[in-house]
């Protein structure tokens, strides 16, 4: 039976980020008496756990229980019906990178179901989808938060919204926006020492949980382009899509049409020489190469690609999967507001999702 002080949680996706989120949710539910947080639905791409009476699913060992389930996920229209029939406020947590789920956000929001997600697809899809999402939320009063869609758990989106909402004028946003690309270049082309083999570092980045489910989505520059699309829109630019501005891909031409991410990783070592050449060209100038992005708000220009940096530059000196994002604004003048720290990884990404959930709870319960 639904109680006013209960909020139902539905989770789609229990991979690298999803598992960490579930563990943070378990701790949160144990710590918070009110509202009571009740997991009523969880699914991966093939399996689901739920019952028709919306009874609580035990969070203890939930990923093993899900793996053993014989039930299939509900089709999205049925899931909207199921969640909106519970009689309790509900938050959907989308921990996938699915475009289909992203495209259904207006339906969930329209039925009063709030959404928190690290999935970039909805907010970097067509400008119409962006408008539909926020107008559906405004109409129903449901909330939508996506902090981890840029810079993982780093407070990038909340900071940009605060700058804009308080009337500052954002003129430029630039930096390193990909945990994978940061890790790859920091280890392949370090400021001291010789660095690793490009293809081996790509495999490592995948094993560490930094890459997208398909690492080609990182290497083709689109993951960064999606993040810049989101930030540019929040800064007031009507960017139509992540492919509507220049984006440099690091996928070798010969591998552009391979069938799967696994086949791509298998074939990549044969093309290591291409990246070695890029690295050597920068070294000749006493520099290192890094993958960066920028948004020039006044000129309405967005770009993504490789640039060379002096060894002493803060971008050259990044470590691990760190992102560094600089906001140039009228108030901050020539010294930008800078955010730096891990930009990928399950726990830090889930932290952004869990903190978004807390924001939603403070507004709906
Ligand atoms: N990893 C990171 O550091 C960061 C990730 N993100 C974003 O977080 C999201 C998740 O990333 P990550 O956890 O690394 O990815 P994973 O590939 O590890 O996990 C994805 C999960 O989503 C499930 N899934 C995929 N499609 C569907 C679908 N249509 N219906 C139901 N479940 C589905 C998968 O199911 P199955 O297990 O059956 O395949 C899997 O459980 C992505 O959007 C990513 O961009 C954002 C910031 C940082
Ligand atoms: N694959 C992404 C994950 C976070 O958005 C990255 O490497 O930055
Ligand atoms: Na973030």
Image (cartoon, rainbow, N blue to C red):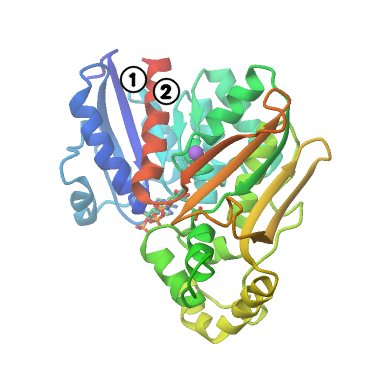
For label 1, being within 8 Å of ligand 1 is answered: no
Give the residue displayed 44% in from the left and 51% down from the top.
344
Q: How far from the left and from the top, in percent, is residue 288?
A: 61, 65
- The disc placed on residue 201 is none
Which residue position is annotated with label 1? 87
The answer to whether residue 123 of the structure is visible from this angle is yes
Is residue 10 rendered to the left or right of residue 311? left
Q: Tell me if 44 is positioned left or right of 23 in this view.
A: right
| Quadrant where the C terminus is found in the figure | top left
Q: Secondary structure at mark 1?
A: loop
Q: State the residue at coordinates (41%, 44%).
A: 349
Could you say which disc has been placed on residue 359 in the image? 2
Whether residue 278 is situated above or below residue 341 in the rendered picture: below
In front: mark 1 or mark 2? 2
Q: Nearer the viewer, residue 258 or 304?
A: 304
Q: Crowding at label 1, few (<14), some or many (≥20) Cα neighbours within 10 Å?
A: some
Q: Position of residue 83 (x, y in %)?
A: 37, 31
> Which residue is more in the foreground, 30 or 202?
202
Q: Quadrant of residue 137 in the image?
A: top right
């Amino acid at each position: 039976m639904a109680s006013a002080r209960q909020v139902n949680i539905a989770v789609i996706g229990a991979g690298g980020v999803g598992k960490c989120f579930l563990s943070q949710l378990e701790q949160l539910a144990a710590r918070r008496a009110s509202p009571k947080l009740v997991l009523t639905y969880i699914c991966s791409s093939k399996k689901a756990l739920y019952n028709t009476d919306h009874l609580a699913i035990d969070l203890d060992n939930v990923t093993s229980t899900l793996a053993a389930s014989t039930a299939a996920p509900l089709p999205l229209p049925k899931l909207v019906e199921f969640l909106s029939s519970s009689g309790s406020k509900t938050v959907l947590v989308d921990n996938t990178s699915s475009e289909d789920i992203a495209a259904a956000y207006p339906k969930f929001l329209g039925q009063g179901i709030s959404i928190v997600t690290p999935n970039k697809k909805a907010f970097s899809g067509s400008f119409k989808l962006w408008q539909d999402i926020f107008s559906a939320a405004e109409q129903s009063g449901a909330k939508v938060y996506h902090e981890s869609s840029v810079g993982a758990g780093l407070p990038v989106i909340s900071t940009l919204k605060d700058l804009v909402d308080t009337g500052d004028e954002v003129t430029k946003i630039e930096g390193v926006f990909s945990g994978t690309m940061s890790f790859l270049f920091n280890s392949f082309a370090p400021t001291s020492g010789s660095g690793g083999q490009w293809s081996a570092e790509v495999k490592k980045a995948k094993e560490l949980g930094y890459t997208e489910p398909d690492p080609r989505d990182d290497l083709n520059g689109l993951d960064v382009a999606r993040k810049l699309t989101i930030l540019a829109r929040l800064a007031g630019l009507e960017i139509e899509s992540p492919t509507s501005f220049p984006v440099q891909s690091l996928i070798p031409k010969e591998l552009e049409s391979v069938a799967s991410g696994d086949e791509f990783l298998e074939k990549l070592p044969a093309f290591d020489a291409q990246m070695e050449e890029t690295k050597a060209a920068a070294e000749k100038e006493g520099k290192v190469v890094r993958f960066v992005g920028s948004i020039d708000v006044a000129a309405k220009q967005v770009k993504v690609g490789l640039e060379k940096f002096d060894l002493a530059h803060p971008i050259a000196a990044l470590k691990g999967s760190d992102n560094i994002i600089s906001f140039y604004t009228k108030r901050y003048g020539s010294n930008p507001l800078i955010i730096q720290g891990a930009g990928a990884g399950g726990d830090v990404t889930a932290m952004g999702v869990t903190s978004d959930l807390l924001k939603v709870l403070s507004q709906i319960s």
